[in-house]
Amino acid sequence: MPEGHTIHRAARDHQRILARQKLIVSSPQGRFSEGASLLNGQICSAVEAFGKHLLYKFNNEYTLHIHLGLFGRIQKQKLPLAEPKSSVRIRLIGKKHLVDIIGPTICEVLGQKGVMALIGRIGPDVLRPDANPDFAFEKISRSKAPIGRLIMDQSVMAGIGNIYRSEILWRQAIHPETPGRAIDRQTFNRIWDDASALLAIGVERNAIITVFDGQLSKKRYGKKFNIFGKASCPKCEGEIRRFEISGRRTFVCNTCQPLMRQLG
DNA sequence: TTGATTGTTACCGG
DNA sequence: TCCGGTAACAATCA
């Protein structure tokens, strides 16, 4: 479920909640990860997203680190309390709302040191104003790996997932198999800027939306994608090729996204 | 029941 | 050493 926008959306939501009410940690019996009992009953003081990682900070210097993986979800509900389903690992309880963290692959408590280490190994996040894209361009321009792999590599740049990958590269007319070293700064900037813009829309709308045809009628978004999962290109009507990069399905229009092995 | 899925990492062989 | 591939883990739905 989650690409970067989902996590930033959750961080924003939860930050808003705890501005008006206390959020207290509770974990259903026996479902805390090791060491996480440090947080039982603690009051959350801040929420922040780094790429696809979600950090809940507490006054006791500890941080709850959540990564939803492929299947994890976050559910916000209004009180009264309902019995959490078996996949709920952490529950944050406020006066009027509760937040359930469901099926995360990472659910651990970090100290200051651990948080620094985590942030250090994540590349610049396209949704964070403090991100430095230079770092991502440096890595990309020195790599012969395909750009389709690099922009989804969270240690190169953070936030983009499998759907945004295909959509961004199609929108920018870049073939996913273009080697990183063939991407010039201008081309990289187009990728970065498009990613920032699209994910920001994703945060606002709580959905992946990459199609903007004329009027922004709010109901016209049944077709959210241009080529992801599609058989033909919406621009040239040509066939969409489907293949894998790093074991994840990728879509490309060979006409609209010509493969450039040379710089240019 | 099977398969597929908006993710990541540990491990192993070349 | 640095890759690329594979398995493993997570939850849900058709």
Image (cartoon, coloured by chain):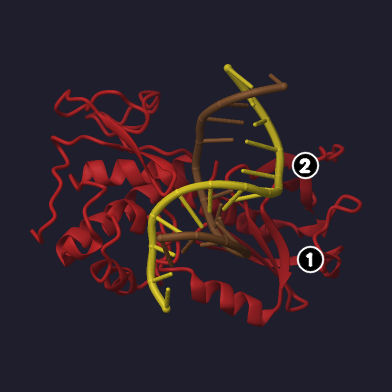
Chain colours: A red, B brown, C yellow
Q: Can residue A23 be seen in this view?
A: yes
What percent of the width, then of the height, locates residue A66? Answer: 65, 58
On screen, residue A218 versus residue A9, left or right, reads: left
Q: Pointer 1: residues within 10 angstroms few (<14), some, or many (20+)?
A: many
Q: Do the residues under discs 1 and 2 have CB atoms within 8 angstroms?
A: no
Q: Is mark 1 on a helix, strand or loop?
A: loop
Viewer-closest of A219 and A70: A70
On screen, residue A197 versus residue A48, left or right, reads: left
Indicate the quadrant containing the C terminus of chain A: top left, top right, bottom left or bottom right.
bottom left
Residue at the disc numbered 1: A43
Viewer-closest of A238 and A8: A238
Q: Pointer 2: residues within 10 angstroms few (<14), some, or many (20+)?
A: some
What is the three-letter code of the residue carrying label 1? Ile
Q: Is mark 2 on a helix, strand or loop?
A: loop
Residue found 13% across the figure and 51% down from its top: A260
Residue at the disc numbered 2: A87
Q: Which of marks 1 and 2 is nearer the N terminus?
A: 1
The answer to which image quadrant residue A126 occupies is: bottom left
Residue found 20% across the figure and 48% down from its top: A174
What percent of the width, then of the height, locates residue A7? Answer: 55, 53
**Above-or-below relation of A112 to A202:** below
What percent of the width, then of the height, locates residue A72? Answer: 64, 45
Residue found 15% across the figure and 63% down from its top: A186
**Above-or-below relation of A222 to A84:** above
Residue found 75% across the figure and 75% down from its top: A59
